[in-house]
Amino acid sequence: MSDFDLAKLLARRGAERYDLHARHLNHQLPRMLHTLGFDKVYERAEGAYFYDAEGNDYLDMLAGFGVMGLGRHHPVVRQALHDVLDAQLADLTRFDCQPLPGLLAEKLLSYAPGLDRVFFGNSGTEAVETALKFARYATGRPRVLYCAHAFHGLTTGSLSVNGEDGFRDGFAPLLPDTPVPLGDLEALERELRVKDVAALVVEPVQGKGVHAAPPGYLRAARELLHKHGALLIADEVQTGLGRTGDFFAYQHEDGVDPDLVCVAKSLSGGYVPVGATLGKEWIFKKVYSSMDRVLVHSASFGSNAQAMAAGLATLAVMDDERLTENARRTGEELRTRLAALVDRYELLHEVRGRGLMIGIEFGKPRSMGLRSRWTMLQTARKGLFAQMVVAPLLHRHRILTQVSGDHLEVIKLIPPLVVGEAEVDRFVTAFTQVMDDAHSGGGFMWDFGRTLIKQALATR
């Protein structure tokens, strides 16, 4: 029997974490973390908090880019995983039908009237890849439309419908897909007239910048797409599972009936990667049209027992703890309190979003002193001011947040759906203090800004 002991291994070599990454993984990650002062050592996590070796708590307003919808280490999901491992199921035989995938598919579809079947993969980008393949096959057309500034994943197919050039640069040639502005129905119809479009893939609320589709757009887009023989794909990888205050974000608007819906992130319970593509019956039956095509699209680890158990436990927790309702209620309180600060701070431009997916955008100030500092930052690199806000939130207030995208002056808040009034109070108090410092024109924030400027100029 092997003498492998995970606890001893971590105790012996855990302190090497940043060196190990620098030597063997993406060497730019530790470099970036060191530069920003984000090279913390978190010892454990629970709910919406991390804890360091001294027992200090850090409020998580990032949720692992949306993965930790239930917070960290929810006891119900932990128990489900213990149970499924102890059951020693005959998993992934490939030549039987286990009950857990069917049960999770049944439960997922109960939240999505009008959708009939599910394909399980392992990630959000796989869910998008599945939707792209199914849409192309079902329509017999090659081209997929996507929205400018969209993010749908980083594998080659999903990258082809990614609206951020920074992710696409250097990876061409990609698939022959075409961007249209979010909300622009005329641009959508112009592309549809060519008669080669399989689908439009759209985030109901874009992750990059936190821009919601305009009211009525998704419904009108679906009508246009169906009129021209194309499909609507709703990418709910980040917005789904209660994040925006409805189970799916497209459900904010009556009459929106997507043909395919992509799900992942929170469905994992924060433990076992899982992605799902929900779709109409006729699409699945066209793709899997005969026994010869039974494996025409599959995933080696798709539908594995651990992922299915985590998914079922996650949905049970969401129902039992009414987390979708909490996201709506708590998100509205947080957004309202932050929006009330816009008139108070000239550097604060707008607060927007839905549920617990909130964007805080900064803009050019009016006063001469602040404007000169703002211009200096923008000249070096757009997005530095937002990073200047993120840094003191962590260093001074022990709150982890993120800049919403490259070259964006937007902070995105996507905390675990379990946060409540105490976390709202903590964040608003900290953010107000950071904004006070920013408008004072000196201190830690602007000293840190000068460090960022030097770094930005050095990398040109």
Image (tube, grey):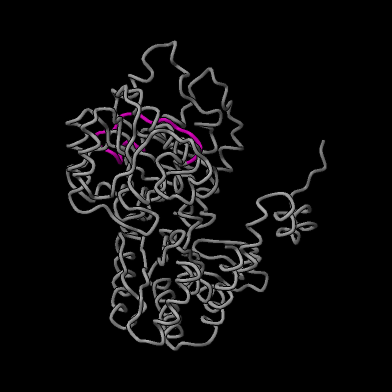
The image shows residue 222, relative to residue 251, as above or below, that is above
Image quadrant where residue 117 sits: top left
Report the residue at 71% width, 58% height from top: 17
Q: Which quarter of the image is occupied by the N terminus?
A: top right
Q: In the figure, residue 372 lies in which quadrant? A: bottom left
Q: Is residue 332 above or below residue 81?
A: below
Q: Is residue 320 visible?
A: yes
> Which one is nearer the viewer's eye here, 169 or 304?
169
If the image is split into quadrants, where does the C terminus sit? bottom right
Work out whether residue 319 can be spotted. no
Instruction: Choose between 433 and 226: the one closer to the eye.
Output: 226
In this picture, residue 5 sits left or right of residue 405: right
Nearer to us in this view, 289 or 404:
404
Q: Residue at x 29, y 55 (%)?
A: 212
- When asked about the image quadrant of residue 430, the answer is bottom left
Depicted 350 relative to depicted 109: above or below: below
Q: Residue at x 38, y 55 (%)?
A: 321
**Relative image position of residue 38 (x, y in whole percent):** 60, 67
Identify whether 256 is placed above or below 377.
Answer: above
Q: Position of residue 161 (x, y in %)?
A: 40, 41
Q: Is residue 117 magenta?
A: yes
Residue 448: image x %, image y %?
56, 78
Count of numbered circles on the image: 0
Is 63 displayed left or right of 109 in the figure? right
Magenta stretch contains residue 370: no
Residue interval drawn in magenta = 108-123
The percent position of residue 410, horizontal first and vertical second, equals 40, 66
